Amino acid sequence: MKEGKLVGRSVARREDPRLLSGRGRFVDDIALPGMLHAQFVRSTVAHGEIASVDLSAVRHVPGVVAAFTADDLELGDITAQLGRPLSEYVPTAMPVLARDKVRYVGEPVAIVVARDAYAAEDGLEAAKVSYTTLPPVTSEEAALAPGAPLVHDEAARNTLVDVSLFATDGIDEIFASAPCVVHVESRTGRQNALPLETRGVVAHWDDREEQLVVQTCTQVPHQVRTVASRSLRLDERAVRVVVPDMGGGFGQKCVVGREEIAAAAAALRLRRPVKWIEDRKDALSASFLAREQHYQVRAAFGADGRILGLDADVVCDMGAYSCYPFTAGIEPLMASAEMPGVYKVPAYRVRGRAITTNKAPTAPYRGVSRPQYVMVVERLFERAARELGLDPVEIRRRNVITDFPYTGVNHITYDPGSYLESLNLCERLVQDEGWYEKQAAAAAEGRHLGIGYACFSERTGYGSTAFAQRKMQVVPGFDISEVRMDTSGAVTVTTGTMSHGQSHETTMAQIVADELGLDIAKVRLHQGDTDRITYGWGTFASRSITVGGSAVRLAAAKLGDKLRAIAAARWGIDADEVELTDGAARRRDDTSEVLTYEDIADIAYLRAHLLPKDIEPGLAATATFDVFTDGTFSNATHGVVVELHQGTGQVEILRYVCVEDCGVAINPQVVEGQCRGGIAQGIAGALFEQVTYDDMGEPSATSFMDYKVPTAHEIPDVLIHHLETPSAFTETGAKGAGEGGTIGAPAAVLNAVNDALRPTGVELDHTPVTPETVHRALNLEAAS
Amino acid sequence: MTDTTAPAQREVQLITLDVNGEQHEVITEPRRTLVDVLRHELRLTGTHVGCEHGICGACTVLVDDRPVRACLMFAAQAEGARIRTVESLSEGDQLGDLQQAFSTHHGLQCGFCTPGFLMLAEGFLAERPEATKEEIREVVAANLCRCTGYQTIVEAIDGCAQARRRACASRCDSKESDVCS
Amino acid sequence: MKPAPFRYHRAPDVDGATRLLAELGDDAKVIAGGQSLVAMMNFRLARPRHLVDIAGIRELGRLHRDADGGLRIGALTTHHTVETDPTGVLGTGFAVLRDAMGWIGHLPIRTRGTVGGSIAHADATAEWCLLAVVLGAEFVARGPRGERRIPVADFFLGYYTTALAPDELLIEIVFPRPAPHAALTEFAERRGDFALVAAAVDLDIEEGTVRGGRVALGGVAAAVVRVPEAEAVLAGGGSFDDCASAAAAAVEPPADASGSTHYRKELVRTLVRRACEEAKSR
């Protein structure tokens, strides 16, 4: 990488002025002439056949303009595919509106379109839907029980994915003869990614362009376009997806939503703009959820604390449907492939399953399985340390990968990282603040302080190769960028990624400004418009800076080549003799010879006759980037100090330290923001948030009273230290930074809680850890 | 006379709202919340809707200088009150000091919750300019943010409060003003 | 989450309000700050056909001490006004009220929410209900049949139910005497939420010695309750620990998703002890 002027600096965010002034444009801010408002009639039963849908009364409610069932709209289903045999993956169709059967409480059955959102809701109350109810499947045990009711007839034993991988030769013997075998069983609560902005869409038919324009808040605009065109049977050209400002996504918006397709279909049918804004009740109970998994994992250790093997069984409760494009395989395949993580694990066996239940479907959520398996593996190390009488940090030191590149038992090759360095530094930061002494002093007073760590890495920059290994039939990976300069020397960068809080308008501009030697104020990022770029894969899996940022840099470099070539031709010298700085091309041998970008653009566009024959008019360049290796791994160690309160069981986080390494940090302040926000979400999963279902499949959380998103009172300040091991694979040396915080926090918090519980002999392995659970553990002796 | 009949649907009434110093006359159903009227009738879309049950605080505005949830108030109830929204914080392109502090401290990412936090802080600091960082954290706990982990929001508000106090102190020192207390 | 249609009526004064309520009957609901009601209406869990807005009735916003040293709080006084006590009327005698306000939701709820609204809503964990019970408040209500005073013991009847008639308006809450050694505390998983359990105590202290006191609990029954068993311990010179244990033993809180009966009883023990200690240290 060449010496950067802006990359590596906490440049002020380009997004901020409009967002701070209330002049952002979120989807609900859009108003089009004649716009109508949609809401959905949703299933009130968890499992049932639809006996009848009667919308006649709905259509007579004042303000209601139309109401449609699945039959009225005749939409194609959304079906996510994996190229695996039926024994490993069962594809299931998700109809845009439920047709014959409903599979969860909240499933959309009909769409009501009215003059405003109030009248639309009045309309919902007039809908008459009758069901022949079926027994609901609301837990893993119920789903896998012999003779269980089937959520999808084609999925026997309610199993959508069942893969057994790796199975190192001799693994049973290793476990049989190991000096120490520890076991962890862990269940993680069903969570909601919970962007503060709920999902929403405004769709309208543009007669002049002969296009259905779908303005929707999605992380994956091109995938929405593909699904919309297929479901509505339009040429893909006839669908334009445009993404306004987005109020977060965290994965919930990286899958295609049925409601955005249904609203688009209604707009097409009515030839009027239709807006749908998901309300919070629906967002909590009927949107895409995440995270509910069950692990049973054994680990074998030598007497010296070296891990000998890992044997895992993972069951992921995906709810009622497989999401598009990732499929129900996303969680079990992620967990199965990546579980050995930062450790040198010589033997490994895993069975990963996705099951379907009568609960709201799931989408990938920040971290995707990694918060869970990291938590399980880190619990295994803590448990082994206890059994072997080793310090919990020391046992990790003996096992983390230190020689890179390292090819693991899971056939993944890890690029260089700072696993050991981050672990040592994190421990030292906790030590230097005196927490071990404070812990001892507290214990003497009968208080319960605990210290916990989590050491992990995170694969970022998944390329097409890596996704193809999962056998996805819709294979994300590459990204495209176009960089163009206008006659004023200003640059528009177009990317296929889609920032929804990650500051790409700033960080991508930093990359381009450096590459072209240009004032960042002259660079503007354009994203989220399928008409502006051939294809793109959007923003998820910490891919935007690694893949999208690389494509952006390559495109900028190509444009730079052209700027140099034009200048060189004017001067009659080699392009190598030209450098680009401060908004101009300069002769290396005589820097007083200058052609500003305006000068060059003037030639390229307005006086093209001056161009040499081999240079085409115009100043634009397109580049694609893909990763053909196993990707690049960010890493971090988190250290947490908690106090458990005897009288209430409350877990108070006293200190949180994060040592992270995401390679070159394009904008350190932005990276820190990603870390802190990710950690907050990880803490939320560890201690607060959960959606449960009763036996009838009724969700527990329909409001923020029941779904406890933590506030500033619960989330601690986080001390962050950066290490920098640049990636060799990305154009900027950056690794992904979007998910690490969420991945490390549950493990570190849970280890700290268990450290504090050490005197009680109780160990807690399920999340969320509630105050009642902690209170029970702390007061066992008193109770007995 | 009182009309005691049950309302027909879509029955409307005329209300007058004082928003950011401007008077607006709105014909609307009484059931429309203040936030919906601000956003969809007055097209002041800077105030956001996050939960419609008073927990997330994305819709926080000032009513008679105090931060309130605009989703827990019908527009009709706001007649006669002075309402301020995020749109009042900047003049033209010039960000106010509180907004600038949010940018400096990276107190926003997606920006959806931000107007609510800004108005919460604006109302709170006006009442308690001497607020400590711990008091600020307690007030920040009123609203939800899913992106930042809150730390930088607290730091931004605290930074703004400190700067205002410094500016106030120096004005007092220079006897330019006697409004500082 | 948009409310069902309703007709909006602004009451000019108390008599106007009660007249409206009498005319409109069961279809009407009073709205003051609306911090509970509007949320319920947005969920369509409440769907009154008429709303009677009393927020403009100035006479209900007074907060003052009466000649007997008692405190009279107009029903429309906001939690925030009590919290900030701009006229200093609370003094040390009613500091417990001021300090308890921090437990009510968050600042933007307290700026709109009213004392009378909270009490009329009668949530079993509401801070004002606890304060009223533990401090022996009286309620002044006015209706078409005139004005009456209702002692707290006769007021809270069960889940969200009070002795107020449908056409009666709660106009004033009277705390009869200062309570310099009282405290309220509570526990919720998340700051600002409705309490799992809340406890309030008002101690009688003479020359540094506890002679007796009142103990009230929220979140353990359909309404806020006094706990005579715990009060007997205080009157008998027992320790705060014994008082807390007596309180925990005396109640049988129903279990729900946020806590088992056992856990809630344990919270009672913790919180009663904590409230006693805080009250004594005042």
Image (cartoon, coloured by chain):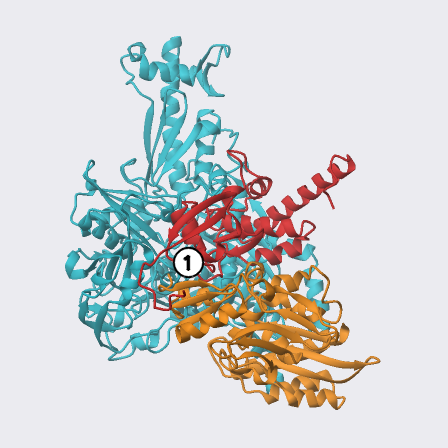
Chain colours: A cyan, B red, C orange
Residue C225: x and y, percent?
59, 83
* Disc 1 packing (10 Å; few <14; some 14–19; many ≥20): many
Q: Where does the image place residue A304, in percent across and percent down from the top left?
A: 55, 65
Tell me if residue C12 comes above or below residue A493 in the rendering.
below
Question: Mark 1 — residue?
Answer: A193
Which residue lies most toward the right here? C207
In terms of depth relative to the viewer, which is nearer, A310 or A215?
A215
Q: Image height check: is A517 above or below B51? A: above
**Residue at point 51%, 44% (across, down):** B20
The answer to whether residue A184 is visible is: no
Asked if residue C53 lies left or right of residue A547, the reply is: right
Residue at the limit of the structure toward the front, as seen here: B1
The answer to which of C175 and C67 lies nearer the viewer is C67
On the image, the x and y values in percent for residue C224 come to 57, 80
Q: Along the horizontal axis of the image, is A391 left or right of A661? A: right
Q: Nearer the viewer, residue A12 or C279?
A: C279
In this orientation, which residue lies closer to the viewer: B55 or A483?
A: B55
Label 1 SS: loop
Query: Is residue A216 left or right of C55 when viewed as pictured?
Result: left
Which quadrant is home to the C terminus of chain C?
bottom right
Look at 53% across and 65% down and name the residue there. C13
Chain under disc 1: A
The quarter of the picture where the N terminus of chain C appears is bottom left
Give how far across and how far down residue A404 sits, in percent. 47, 47
Single out the residue that lies furthest toward the top: A572
